[in-house]
Amino acid sequence: MSISCQKKDKIFHLQTPNTSYVMGVLDNKHLLHLYYGKRIDEYCCILDNFPISGESAFSPIDIPEHFMSTNMLPMEYPCYGSADFRSPAFHAEYEDGSSVTCFEYESYKIFSGKKKLPGLPATYVEEDSEADTLEITLCDHLTGIRVVLSYTVFNHIDAIAKSVQVKNEGAQTVTVKSALSSTVHLFDKNYEFVHLEGAWARERSIQKRPLLNGVMQIDSKRVSSSHHHSPFIALARPYATETQGDVYGFSFVYSGNHIEQVEVNEFDVARVQVGINPFGFGWQLIPGETFQTPEVILTYSDEGFGKMSRTYHKLYRTRLVRGKYREEERPVLINNWEATYMDFNEEKIMKIAEKAQSVGIDLMVLDDGWFGKRNSDNCSLGDWVVDRNKLPNGIESLATKVNELGMQFGLWFEPEMISEDSDLYRKYPDWCVHIDGRKRIPARQQLTLDLTKEEVRDYIVEAVCSVLKSAPISYVKWDYNRNVTEIGSKSLPPERQQEFAHRYVLGVYEVLERITSAFPEVLFEGCSGGGGRFDAGMLYYYPQYWTSDNTDGVERLSIQHGTSMVMPASTMGAHVSAVPNHQVGRNTPLLFRGHVAMAGQFGYELDLNTLSEEEIDLVKEQLAQYKDIRNVIQKGEMYRLASPFEGRNTSWEYVYEDRVVLIYYTICARSTLGKTCIKLCGLDEHATYVETTSGKEYRGSYLMNVGLYFEDKKDYDSFLLVFKKQ
Ligand code: GLA
């Protein structure tokens, strides 16, 4: 059992293979967070060796027996209104207008396995023996509000899943203004706040800044996890690197408004919190109702960022992604978007497919523009009926013809959206998110459907399913190309309007669950103008995600490097596109673009008919090489050996069973500076590794300590080496 409760002092000790998380109950019934970090055998005492001392002047001494103030305590689930003046995890308004809550420890329960979170994505176990769960109940006796804090400890992965259930067991209606999923305390402030910032076509750049006293925060108020701030932070020692130093990771399994913040108080204690953004949030709980928060996945690594990422990769690849494509190798696809945009017909698509089939591509994806009268992005979203002008024989005929080539067929949808110029809008003008009397602000000339409405959700399920039933479609690209404005819904009474943002996200999850479970054979790829909303919540429904609309090889190095902080390679859609690149105009060699895309779910996004014979030969080689190494990249342990954020080159390594793939990219050549040394990681020191092209043999200890030297001779140069362990 990875969870123990020492009854005398009420100390809860959670142990993963290499980490410990400890809480304790003070004699006044406050639940405290006492430790998170490297695994310890035992935590002995609460007060004799307490990490905080000193007088909290101007803070009431509300625990006179120990001359303490709650304001100096590491409260495990802090609530608003007590003597703790820092950011609470819980804040509610009661019928008399007051908003003071005071949680006291009540009981606990430990069991094997992990419960599902109703209506929410979450990590899971297949056998109860994979994890243990602790539930601790706190109670506010005056109002009858109880919170059940849940901690699932994975037995073979250094991860803890935390979530909270708020139960109204009192007699009055309560409005929950904030119910965060996790609070953790670190007992000094010598950390950097690390997060993934971005924008459209520039997703997930790694940002680091030192913690200072006060609040440091990232968030989203877009009803989407967004391109701008991924729902993830790490707290890392300033000296932490890819291979050493303490790093704490917090990854939120949620796709809507989120907040990740650290508050450092006057004692230099850092309170780290993650949850649904309290901004604009309010949730009414009538007596007997419960509110479930999404979960946060915590991990601690004493071997730098690399180990933190590998923990997330393993957990998300094996116990968050579901369905047949979790294990099965995914098809290599070709997508027509950058080849034709919306200007296509059946003949053009078939020509692209035929050429793709001749080089060994498995799946032809038809992107935006196949429905309604969609020749530009100003119309037809919502009208999921084929445009017979472009495809006179319909989707079924096109899909069948593609199948006859020996390829699978895939289709693009953007089901959460509606164009003002659409039959759907003409019929149901009030199905979009809007506030009566206010302008409906379009973005990319479209509005968002109101997924808090049951009839809208049913429409989406019916519309998408009927297309999927009508033709042999093996793959769906599910896009989402704007963020929500004019928030509110007539489906909700005035006192529940602040529930909209979370209810929208629950609506998306419901629709995705219904559609993906009705078509378990179909491979779903998520997308939101590239990698907006590419979060852990979405991976529960889509095993892969279009990482960015930016397909330039150089830009992609940073985007994929940043994304890999949390997301495994098996989830990152990555395509070779044409040059000059459509987003940044850069010319890079096909070899380089191929090597960049091979570090994810490989595909092409161009018309192969425009390539020369030599280029087509190279495409054939790329496909053969990718198919040979893809299980190493998809299932292997990833090591980031050189970062595009720090230098002129990038290098990634993947280790799976007896094979190793090393990719080295020169972004920018340099002169007279010697060579770049790349030391491999994760090998067996005493084993011999053969580099498969040259037949050269190396000992693991040589590759890891002496390393291999690369010359940065040419811009956009790249090497992919495969080693086999003897
Ligand atoms: C978004 C996607 C692109 C493409 C277009 C189609 O921008 O990210 O890949 O599908 O929509 O409109």
Image (cartoon, grey):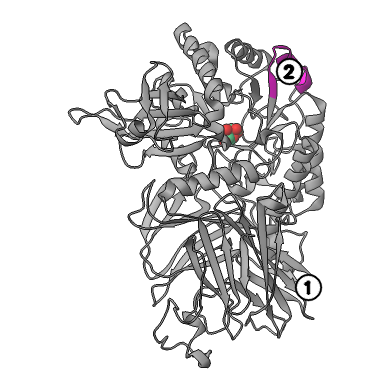
Question: Can residue 645 be seen?
Answer: yes
Q: Secondary structure at mark 1?
A: loop
Q: Is residue 438 above or below residue 68?
A: above
Residue 670, quarter of the rendered image: top left
Q: Secondary structure at mark 2?
A: helix
Residue 401 located within the stretch drawn in magenta: yes
Q: Is residue 387 above or below residue 133?
A: above
Name the residue beneath numbered marker 2: 398
Q: Which percent across, then down, holds residue 562?
A: 45, 43
Name the residue beneath numbered marker 1: 286
Between 110 and 519, the residue placed more toward the observer is 110
* In the image, farthest residue toward the front: 686
Please, what is the three-letter code of the amino acid marked with disc 1? Ile
Residue 553, quarter of the rendered image: top left
Question: Can residue 534 be seen?
Answer: no
C-alpha distance separating marks 2 and 1: 52 Å
Residue 416 located within the stretch drawn in magenta: no
Span highlighted in magenta in the image: 392-409
